[in-house]
């Protein structure tokens, strides 16, 4: 069964949040899977020419070469692709699986196993839980922050504070303020061109004072090659820690799926500079490179926790490895 929002969060007692009644949940999950398949259409079409029904009927060297080419083209990554194809070829040669549909199903299983790394949940037991949003310019941090606030409020009834620590991008503060209104979240901003660290500090303090459940700190976009801005991000983390020693409790890195292998490089360098707890993979609906989710998880061991597939509120959703792999292959 596909993951829903309550499955993503750990609440008091160390267990996922309570789920809604089964019939409504199942209906919504089926509908989401259909949307996911449509969102991954470009990636699936890129794979489809090679992963046609006849591909696995003749398990020759050409079969494995074509499969390898298809996965690399979808940005699954050379290392991850080699691992998957080698395993499939070994199992097929040993007689463990037949060709045709059985081999396709095993491919889906292997891709899901690779995507399923670490703890892909978000722990909301600290009060307040501080979430720090980071990433390269234009990856959708602010939009993701607003949508996440909306779902935390709708699904769990949590009180959320949105903190506009992106004090440099034009209209960033106003954009986040609009999301705060839509989600019913408290909003904290500083003066124009204020120090991002001071805004983050005051935002967390406001969350403590108001008894908020979650504080989401939206930071300015920065290239992973900009050493001074990466140092600033580390400073923001330290400043937040002065307000709450264990905070931020989770750092989510947003990665634009359309950047393909460059997204893998971004995740690698950000994770070297700060403690990245999970990824938000955005813009999956506009790319044929959806396999990058598998490359990042498989090569860096960083769990994908959320995926974005559009501009609507429901276009942000928890990542489900098995569901994603099946929608990817078709």
Image (cartoon, rainbow, N blue to C red):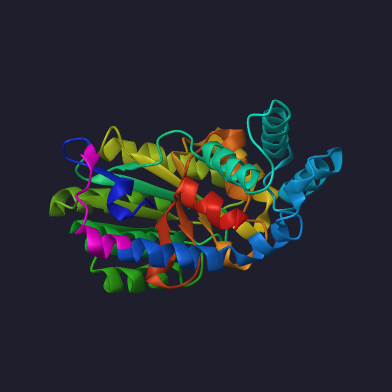
With 177 as the anchor, is 252 left or right in this view?
Answer: right
Q: Is residue 23 covered in magenta?
A: yes
Q: Which residues are magenta?
A: 15-26
With 163 as the anchor, is 310 left or right in this view?
Answer: right
> Is residue 262 in sight in this rendering?
yes
Indicate the position of residue 138 as horizontal and vertical percent values.
57, 63
Q: Residue at x 68, y 53 (%)?
A: 260
207 lies above or below 268 = below
Q: Residue at x 42, y 73 (%)?
A: 312
Indicate the position of residue 120 as horizontal and vertical percent values.
41, 41
Of residues 38 and 285, the one drawn nearer to the viewer in this rendering: 38
Q: Is residue 185 covered in magenta?
A: no
Indicate the position of residue 131 as horizontal and vertical percent values.
35, 47
With 213 as the anchor, is 321 left or right in this view?
Answer: right
Q: Residue at x 59, y 40 (%)?
A: 106
113 lies above or below 324 = above
> Is residue 125 in sight in this rendering?
no
Of residues 270 and 11, the one drawn nearer to the viewer in this rendering: 11
């Amino acid at each position: 069964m596909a993951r829903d929002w309550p499955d993503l969060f750990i609440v008091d007692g160390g267990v996922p949040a309570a789920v809604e009644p089964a019939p409504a949940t199942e209906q919504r999950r089926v509908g989401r899977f259909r949307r996911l398949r449509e969102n991954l259409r470009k990636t699936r079409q890129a794979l489809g020419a090679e992963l046609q029904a006849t591909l696995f009927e003749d398990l020759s060297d050409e079969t494995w070469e074509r499969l390898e080419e298809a996965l690399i083209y979808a940005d699954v990554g050379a290392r991850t692709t080699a691992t998957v194809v080698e395993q499939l070829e070994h199992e097929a040669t040993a007689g463990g699986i037949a060709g045709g549909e059985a081999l396709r199903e095993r491919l889906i299983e292997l891709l899901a196993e690779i995507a399923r790394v670490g703890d892909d949940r978000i722990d909301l037991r600290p009060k307040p839980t501080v979430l720090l949003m980071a990433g390269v310019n234009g990856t959708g941090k602010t939009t993701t922050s607003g949508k996440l606030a909306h779902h935390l409020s709708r699904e769990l009834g949590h009180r959320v504070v949105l903190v506009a620590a992106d004090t440099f991008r034009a209209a960033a503060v106003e954009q986040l303020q609009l999301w705060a209104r839509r989600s019913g979240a408290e909003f904290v901003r500083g003066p124009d061109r204020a120090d991002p660290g001071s805004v983050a500090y005051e935002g967390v303090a406001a969350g403590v004072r108001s008894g908020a459940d979650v504080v989401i700190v939206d930071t300015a976009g920065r290239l992973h090659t900009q050493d001074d801005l990466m140092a600033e991000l580390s400073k923001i983390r330290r400043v937040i820690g002065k307000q709450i020693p264990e905070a931020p409790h989770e750092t989510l890195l947003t990665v634009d799926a359309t950047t393909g292998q460059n997204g893998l490089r971004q995740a690698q360098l950000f994770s070297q500079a700060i403690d990245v707890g999970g990824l938000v993979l955005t813009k999956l609906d506009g790319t044929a490179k959806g396999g990058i989710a598998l490359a990042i998880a498989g090569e860096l061991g960083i769990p994908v926790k959320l995926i974005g597939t559009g501009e609507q509120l429901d276009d942000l959703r928890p990542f489900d490895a098995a569901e994603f792999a099946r929608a990817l292959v078709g």
